[in-house]
Image (spheres, coloured by chain):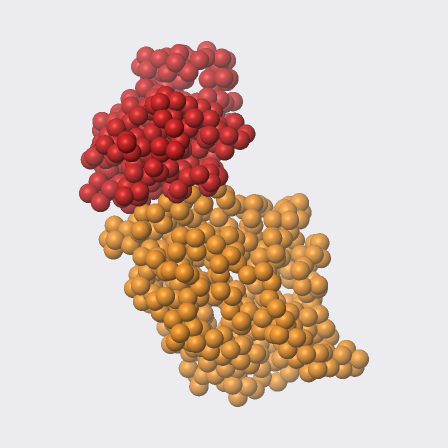
Chain colours: A orange, B red
Amino acid sequence: MFGQVRYWALKELFIPLLRTYEAKRRGSRPRKGSLPLSSNRVLKGLIMSHYYLGRYAKGVLPVAWVTSGAPVELLRPFGFYTIYPENHSALCAAQKMGGGLCLVAEERGYSKDLCSYAKIDLGVFFSGRTPVGRLPKPDLLFASNNICGTVLYWYRVLSKEYSIPLIVFDTPFNYGPLRQEDLDYMLDQIEEIIEKLQRISKREFRMERLIKTMRLSKATCELWQEILNTMKQIPAPATIFDIFSHMLPIVSLRGLRSAHSYYQVLYWELLQRVRDKVSPLSEERIRLLWDNIAIWYKMRDLSELMMRHKANLVGATYTNAWAETIVHMDPTRPFESLAKAYSLVILNNNLYHRLELIRKLATEFKVNGVIMHSARSCKPYSLGQYDIKRILQERYNLPCLILEGDIADERYYSDEGNKTRIEAFLESLI
Amino acid sequence: MKRVFGGIDIGSLTTKVVLIDEKMSILSGQIIYTGYDGIHAAHEALERALSEARLKQEEIQGIVATGYGRHLLDFAHKAVTEITCHALGALYYYPNLRTLLDIGGQDSKAIGVDPGSRRVTNFRMNDKCAAGTGRFLEVMAERLRLDMERMIQLALDAKEALEISSLCTVFAETEVVSMVAQGKPIGEILRGLHMAVINRVYPMLRDVGIKPDVVMTGGVAKNKAIVRLLEERLKLKVFVPPDPQLTGALGAALIAMNTSD
Ligand code: SF4
């Protein structure tokens, strides 16, 4: 009872105050020469309150830990408080805590070669160290293998350690177009998942609630798409690093009103910049596309390096992943929509799909070249990049650079070497 | 008054300076060890180059810095990567250059060049691992107590190359020591070691595309065994410019000349 009162008081009274305060506060040190978005402050309040409220959610709401590619919309009608370990790992990495937390997991015997999102999360589990104070213990784990196989093993470890159920949404890989039998298989799973969720949350499933969530989710993804579209403007109103840092709502708060409201604020600000032709660069001489997940601990350095060379990263296959499957979302047919939208994501698709996607984005965003981050962690995203690069260069005359590094473990990044690679690449484009 | 331009290449091992005049004639070139202070090395090398050419620093119209310490120099007018500089320096001697291999003390690079536009079209760089760099051969020479010249000659004279299977410098060292202990012919071991370097850089070359003219620069280009074995492997003539270590600094000087107009 006390827990419930405390949670609702925090949610309704304290959090709005915190967010107003954060929105008014002056931001931290901006990147050199950069033009920080004023929405950043609103975002900071949103992230803080999301993790802060999470601390008190345990016992009041069922808590689920979810993979970034799981159909979270299914959880929303049951009122789960959702935490995204991948997102939290990225947050740790951005605070340069990644390497240290990975080490904790490695000392426990986990392989160095594991994805660093997983290693960081296990490191947090074993050490309790996190920049957000405390993560609420999960009652349920919800994973989908549409992004990789790693998440299954990682979540199995969590399931064993916490002694809690794990629900897996299995999405067959698309070697070609989606097959009917795969669709049927996924629809069967969704029905089973709903039954399990009713049991775990002790709440009835209500279809109209799911439809409502789907509407909100679709609207948020559409808004996200519009935000990405502003970057097609020459000069672009922001940098991809700005966009990367605004991904938390679309990943972690998808299907919730707060994500949608936040993106209205961001979209409005970007629209103003487009209208006034405001650019964070003094001059935009080179436009580039990014492939693969961000390098979270290098955002500031990379952004400054790009600016110095009057180059701007304006689009990314990564940010596009949350807009790519909107076409399959029909809120009136929620089950089918979820199956399609979640199984047709970039990482569950063949390399030809990836090649065509990069070509399409390169044309739409009018870029001069592509930077492909070959991420040690993420095999499904990095596999095939050398072939894609060769085809893009030879057949389509699109210059590409492969940058070896890692998403979250700074120990795998060669600063000098990569600086030379990037500069040499930019020199070849001018 | 003569117009003079300078290129300074601050590498992790050595620092190089080249001075040219407006007719692109090379006035002087210097190589010194970088040591722990790249800025000091750059000043030192520049002074030596100036005195060799009987010039004063004020007479230099433009200086471009390159190499891993390229951002250190406040008196340079511009910093350009060694990848671009090596390509331009090699084009100076070989205008039909298409594929460039640069093996230095600490890293190696394969660079694809379009001679028409004089641009770098593609490149690969290895800076993670000593195998495939000059350091690999130095470590082995030290281990076998041979001087470099002798090592190269023995490798050239051998008819066969023993296969060194380890890709890692440390493991290869152990492998070589055990080969010596087994009484395997030293020449064949050494030829094998040179092949190991080539096997390491070959995939990078293939990735950027192997097209004539193939040119090799960097300190290791002075190693005749490497050049010969590379020619055999590629079945192509491999050109080596005079003073291959100075190619980056020369390219930097050429950029200084072109940007000062
Ligand atoms: S980064 Fe790649 S490997 Fe790691 S969890 Fe995400 S998709 Fe899986």
The residue that appears at 52% across and 27% down in the rendered structure is B35
Give the residue at x 46% y 26%.
Answer: B44
Q: Is residue A75 visible?
A: yes
Say which quarter of the image contains residue A122.
bottom right
Query: Is residue A381 toward the left or the right of residue A128 in the image?
Result: left
Furthest residue to the right? A2
Task: Pick whichever, A333 or B47, lies toward us.
Answer: B47
Q: Is residue B53 left or right of residue A403?
A: left
Q: Camera-side residue: A102 or A415?
A: A415
Coordinates of residue B134 in the picture (x, y in percent): 42, 26
Above or below, B132 against A297 in this view is: above
Residue in the image at 66% along x and 75% along y: A21
Q: Residue A195 in the image: x percent, y percent?
A: 58, 78
**Seen from this angle, which residue lies furthest front?**
B1
The percent position of residue A98, horizontal first and vertical second, equals 60, 52
Total numbered circles:
0
Quick check: A115 left or right of A157?
left
Work out whether residue A295 can be spotted.
Answer: no
Going by the image, does B107 lie left or right of A199?
A: left
Residue found 50% across the figure and 43% down from its top: A414
Place of residue A180 in the rendered image (x, y in percent of width and height, measured from the top left):
37, 73
In the rendered view of the protein, which quadrant contains the N terminus of chain B?
top left
Quarter of the figure with the C terminus of chain B: top left
